[in-house]
Amino acid sequence: MFDWKWDFTWEILPRLISATGNTLIAAGAGYVIAVVLGLMLALAQRTPSRAVTFTVREFVEFIRSTPLILQIFFVFYVGPQFGIRLSPWMSGMIAIGLHYACYLSEVYRGGIESVPKGQWEAAIALNMTTVQKYRRVIIPQAIPPALAGMGNYLVGIFKDTPMLSVIGVAELIHTANAIGSENYRFLEPYTMVGIIFLAISLPAAGLIRLFEGYVRRKLGL
Amino acid sequence: MLDKTGFPLEITGEDTPMVSFRKVNKSYGALTVLDDLDLDVAAGEMVSIIGPSGSGKTTVLRMLMTLERINGGVIYVDGKPLTHMPRGGQLVSANERHLRSRRADIGMCFQHFNLFPHMTALENCMEGPVQVLGLPKAEARDRSEELLELVGMIAKKDQHPSRLSGGQQQRVAIARALAMRPKVMLFDEVTSALDPEVIGEVTNVIRQLVSEHNLTMLMVTHQMGFARDISDRVCFFYGGRIEEQGPPTQLFGNPQRERTQQFLSAVREAV
């Protein structure tokens, strides 16, 4: 039935593992961008300036309503027309980071809105500045309820890295394609890619849950 | 000197009230919550505010803490305008910076305590002094421990609020507010969310503050006995105005207005 070749599997494994490293770097760097930028987007939507709030909200809606792959193409192929020349790696991480920042900003927003009104009032009663209020009172309480959503998007960003193959980032799918075309065999490389994704995603989800519990205990919540 | 609408830019003189509401109005849409409120509280005075729900009593405290904006009139704290600031001989609505500079005189305790759940009792008390007043940590710690001692919570200083009972949380909240060294303390129904058996531990702390400290205090409460015991003056609010006010013996013992009499007899029946 299946014509599975073990010797071929072992032969291509080192290349796939090295590509796994690239995938993890792309996902990790993209996620760092998304976590930081997402928080800034969420906070920008709470400024008193209606112009800022409106612009940011529309931007987030725009990014969330268009495909990631289009955004990747835009950064990589259209960017140079505006004088922004980036390597495939840079383009990919920026596009994916930006895309997920918009999703994460909604997760943060939910977290921030879940902080009870009394906490905001207590911060005012202590005469805190806006920055102190967010940094010391609101964000520490907004993060724990956001952690589950943040974890989902960590796994999501990891699973979306194959899209970077379209602009030539040597992540897993790109490497599996290359191996397949060189050897006219696709069964082993694609199967292995699936197994690698599964082997990383599943434990990651579990670790995120453990981390969530740890943070809640640490904050005394 | 008066502003063109007739409000003084500053209240001066020996008997300057610590808190002064002048013709203060507050409404939510068509609903008038406070109607031309005039109320002066002298330095060191303890004023209790009682009245039926919806009479605007909590709003008085919330406006003074700048949690709510007012729609008309001016509030002064220690003679200087709180809700407004002087600009070219006129009073204009206060900006955030002015509010921050004036708000430092006021501290507040809430019905639901509102302690920061991610900080221990001690950290809750140190937060304001360290972050807002810029005190060195060691000094803030000493001050906070002293206050936790005062409210009888020093043994639990390293506990998070989730591990404390309501009465204990409220006592920490009082210490937290005091740590900012306010001139005026506001107590907004601080015993309403407590189980009956722990109300005493909170009222005893407030009693102690009244007898040993020269703080100006405004308290909204449903506990008539407590208000009667410790207040210098009691204000009965009805429909957004002060229906009747006076020393507790007079207001509770010999109320003049019919609405006050009705309210007090209704409260007595409920007990």
Image: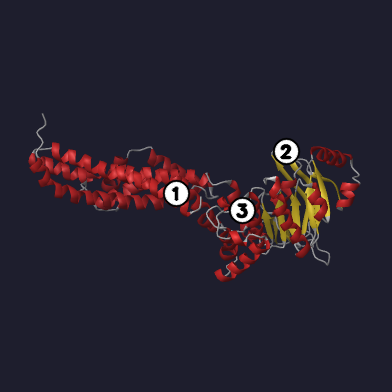
Find disc 2 in the rendering and name its residue. B31
- Please say whether residue B190 is visible from this viewpoint: no
Looking at the rendered structure, which numbered label has been put on residue A122?
3
- Do the residues at pointers 3 and 2 share their chain? no
Residues A43 and A55: in front is A43
Residue drawn at x 34%, y 44% is A205
Residue A178 placement (x, y as % from top left): 14, 44
**SS of the residue at dot 1?**
helix
Residues A3 and B238: in front is A3
Distance of mark 3 from mark 1, alpha carbons? 25 Å
Disc number lying in front (3 or 1): 3
Crowd tier of the residue under label 1, counting other residues whose Cα lies within 10 Å: few below 14, some 14–19, many 20 or above:
many
Crowd tier of the residue under label 3, counting other residues whose Cα lies within 10 Å: few below 14, some 14–19, many 20 or above:
many
Residue B149 placement (x, y as % from top left): 65, 64
Indicate left or right for B94 with B211 as reference: left
Residues B71 and B106: in front is B106
Which picture quadrant has residue B105? bottom right
Farthest residue to the top: give it.
A1
Distance of mark 3 from mark 2, alpha carbons? 26 Å
Residue A34 placement (x, y as % from top left): 37, 49
Find disc 1 in the rendering and name its residue. A41
Provide the chain ID for the residue under circle 2: B
Crowd tier of the residue under label 2, counting other residues whose Cα lies within 10 Å: few below 14, some 14–19, many 20 or above:
few
Q: Quadrant of the N terminus of chain A?
A: top left
- Amino acid under disc 3: Ala
Residue drawn at x 73%, y 45% is B26
- Amino acid under disc 2: Leu
Provide the chain ID for the residue under circle 1: A
Residue A219 vertical placement versus A159 (above, below): below
- State the colouring used for the structure image: secondary structure
